[in-house]
Amino acid sequence: MSNGDIFVGEVIGTAILILFGAGVCAAVTLRYSKARASGWVVIAFGWGFGVLAGAYTAAPLSGGQLNPAVTIGIAVDTGKWDKVWVYLLGQIVGAMLGAVLAYLVYLAQFQANVREEGTTEGTADEPVPTLGVFATIPEIRNPVANLVTEIIATMSLVLPVLAFGLTKGLGESGTTVLIVSLLVVGIGLSLGGPTGYAINPARDLGPRIVHTFLPIPNKGTSDWGYSWIPVVGPLIGGALAGLVYNIAF
């Protein structure tokens, strides 16, 4: 694969991933969305379908990694680092593009960014926080615990992804991406409660940057004090998964 193909594939695939992922978060969160308050299961499946659509789209060009943690895990396992920077650059750019597209889809809802009068969530004209549409927020802010959660959750993604490569039938049938998508849904349902399961540095960092600059009314903070955890945690988890896979398999 050429550097150009890798970059274009990762930009397109990651943009689709974030469009679906940020889109489902917006659908569940924002006022006047028809899917408002539909819950965590909907979010988990929305992200899973985003992986499905993005990875299948990018696969012919770049292999559809879409995640720096996966890219680092593969590099640690194989020892091939020469194209890692191309993957990471494409993933960050794609994540930012996807976040902008999700914002445009829900533009009217972002402009009506207040809570409904009479709800238990707050009073009328009180802003609905929007960072959760774009980036992760821990339910309990504990840096050590949050970091450990992201490391373990990312290992639970990257180690199976690497192992799926040994399963000949999956590769021949073309269902590897489908299985990975279901894996992401499972991680969201089982391990996503503490931190919102970033498990992907580009997924969190790119949209967080976009949130900082978008003209969203009453958007609140972009919480840069927490932002290192969903980047460092998944990178550590991906590297550890690559190391474990290399030793054990």
Image (cartoon, grey):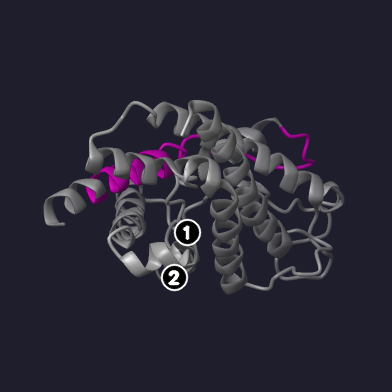
Residue nearest the observer in this picture, 243 or 104: 243
User: Residue beneath label 1, please?
Assistant: 139
Q: Residue 186, labelled with which disc?
A: 2
| Discs 1/2, front | 2
Residue in the picture at 57% in, 39% down: 9
Q: Is residue 32 left or right of residue 199?
A: right
What SS does tag 1 mark? Answer: loop
Residue in the picture at 69% in, 30% down: 213
Q: Is residue 170 left or right of residue 210?
A: left
Above or below 162: residue 2? above
Q: Tell me residue 38's x, y (percent).
A: 68, 73
Residue nearest the observer in this picture, 72 or 167: 167
Mark 1 vs 2, N-terminal side: 1
Residues at marks 1 and 2, CA–CA distance in whole angstroms: 19 Å
Which residues are the magenta region? Answer: 214-241
**Hey, which residue is sitting farthest left in the picture?**
247
Residue in the picture at 47% in, 46% down: 63
